[in-house]
Amino acid sequence: MFKPILIALTILVFVLTACSPMAAQYPELTGLSPEASNDYDAPREAPAPEGGQFAIADEAAGIAERRIVIKEAQLEIVVADPPETLDMISQLANEMGGYVVSAYLHQTRTASGEEYPRATITIRVPSERLDEALSVIEDQSDRLPVRRVNSQDVTSEYTDLQSRLRNLEAAEDQLIRIMESASRTEDVLNVHRELTNVREQIELIKGKIQYYDQSSQLSSITVDILPKEAILPITIAGWEPVGVARDALQALVNVLQFLVDALIWIGIVILPVTVVVMLPIYLLVRLFLRKRSQRKASSVTQSPS
């Protein structure tokens, strides 16, 4: 009997209906005992802001004018010294009032087997200085950089979170007043459980609002720093002398490798097998020829002179 009443109470609190006057006139809706309901003084309605509906409309218009936009940029640049450029970008983020989110320096292997350093870094800078930061980083590139910028307008989600936060905070105040006026332990425990649930939702929404605030104020830039030596040279009229020389050298290495592999196979596999197989055949043939020669000699000796 008490649980349906408590559910009805929670719904009434969340939608912010006039639960305070109803609690004073109909104590049974609060789920509290008659003594707790008599002791509970329903809070008076807060006075309307000056200007009435016009003031509320002006406040809503102010929220709508503030656009919450999250910007993220990705760059790909080619430099002669990736580690040095990595340090420069880190210092740039600090000088602009931002910070380094992550930085990664590793070795990359080219098609010819050579290794060169390569780096990836993600920084955050003030949104109003995003274009400035991109220009400074792009100036470090020896070739035309690749730029991608994504913008996400989360104004509607942000406004919705603000509205939900106000509703939950008002519900929290109502539940606190009800719990303070309750006299039965069962009433206190049930209201405390609902109050804990509301506070958890408040913390989650505050976290999302904080994320939107920080993401809109500090834009993200991810830079992929490629070594100049690892990039293929630019071809002219389809002819690439460096590439031809590299292919010829690779072909020579392949031929020499084939010859060495062949000699190894001959020495380790083919030669022993040949000796094992051919030696018995050679001995049998030689024995056969020797016997044949002996028979001829014997026949010549026995024939009349």
Image (tube, rainbow, N blue to C red):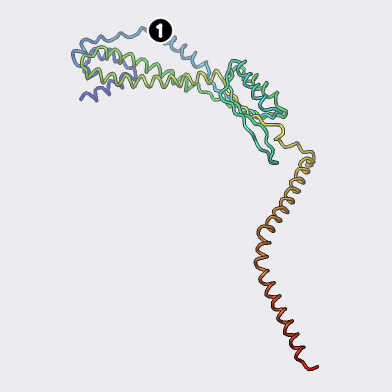
Taking depth in this image into account, of 179 and 85 the one nearest to the observer is 85
Residue at x 48% of width, y 22% of height: 156
The residue most toward the bottom is 304
Q: Is residue 292 left or right of residue 6?
A: right
Q: Amino acid at mark 1?
A: Pro
Taking depth in this image into account, of 67 and 77 the one nearest to the observer is 77
Location of residue 252 with respect to 110 vertically, above or below: below
Give the image location of residue 159, x and y in percent. 46, 19
Q: Which residue is mark 1?
A: 49
Residue at x 66% of width, y 38% of height: 109
The residue most toward the right is 305
Taking depth in this image into account, of 242 and 260 the one nearest to the observer is 260
Residue at x 62% of width, y 17% of height: 129
Element under disc 1: loop
Location of residue 279 with respect to 239 vertically, above or below: below
The residue most toward the left is 34
**Quadrant housing the N terminus:** top left
Give the image location of residue 127, x and y in percent. 58, 18
**Quadrant housing the C terminus:** bottom right
Rendering quarter of residue 137: top right
Q: Is residue 279 left or right of residue 204?
A: right
Q: Is residue 280 left or right of residue 246?
A: left
Give the image location of residue 106, x and y in percent. 62, 32
Give the image location of residue 18, x and y in percent. 30, 15
